Image (tube, rainbow, N blue to C red):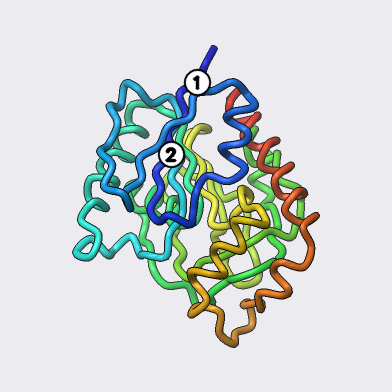
Amino acid sequence: MRTNVHYFQHVPFEGPGAIGTWATRSGHRLSSTRFCDGDPLPALEDVDWLVVMGGPMSIHDERAYPWLRREKHFIESAIQARRTVLGVCLGAQLIADVLGAKVYANRFKEIGWFPIQRTPEAATTRVGSALPEAIEVFHWHGDTFDLPSGAVHLARSEACANQAFVYQDRVVALQFHLEATGAGAEQLVAHCAAEIVEGPFIQQPEAMLADEGRFSKINDVLVRLLDRLATS
């Protein structure tokens, strides 16, 4: 069965990355709403999967980005309509927000490659068990969220307690970027260089981009997670 995978993109330099590759290779239809280009929202009935990408703005920046209100309403409607929903970074925070959880600045920014640890609860879920017990992943975020009521906590890191959750087995929120590629990381470095300051969990660009093999490893984990989500 051909699935309609629709993604929300907030800025030109944060696209679906390896998620788009997975969708295409799996024979799914891939479409998008690029808020940065003023695109309209799709009809909910045309969306089987909703993927919400990242961006440098906050979920609270509705005055600067009025489309955030419409986006939140659409995400909430998609969840209520039992669509499969995946959020990455800002997308994860938007999901947490529409599920009633608090979103706020984390004590530390995480930018670069740092390990996450899978929670014991994650192993009890089909999607969460796709994550290794520990893996180094690519981060670029300053905000975090509380866990929504009914969500299962999937992962944590030294800098950030709530790295991921799953809700009702079909709504997944990831603070980290399993979809990142080397080219995508270069775009983040180019457009968000002002965020690369001294900090205990901030790497310099040379360290972030030194090993292309790191991206292949996290993309493999992404594929396993998406395949599990597709059959959950």
Can you tell which quarter of the image residue 134 is in? Answer: bottom right
Residue at 61% across, 48% down: 179
Q: Is residue 129 left or right of residue 100?
A: right
Residue at 22% across, 50% down: 69
Q: Is residue 165 left or right of residue 99?
A: right
Of helix, strand and loop, which one carries label 2? strand
> In the rendered image of this protein, does residue 88 appear above or below residue 196?
above
Q: x, y (%) of residue 88?
A: 50, 50
Residue at 42% across, 65% down: 56
What residue type is disc 1 on? Thr
Q: x, y (%) of residue 20?
A: 56, 37
Pick the residue in front: 167 or 143: 143
Q: x, y (%) of residue 142?
A: 48, 71
Distance from disc 1 to disc 2, alpha carbons, whole Å, reads 13 Å
- Crowding near pointer 1: few (<14 within 10 Å), some, many (20+)? some
Of helix, strand and loop, which one carries label 1? loop
Q: Which mark is residue 3?
A: 1
Can you tell which quarter of the image residue 60 is in? Answer: bottom left
Q: x, y (%) of residue 216?
A: 75, 48
Pick the residue in front: 23 or 48: 23
> In the rendered image of this protein, does residue 195 appear above or below residue 119?
below
Mark 2 highlights which residue?
A: 7
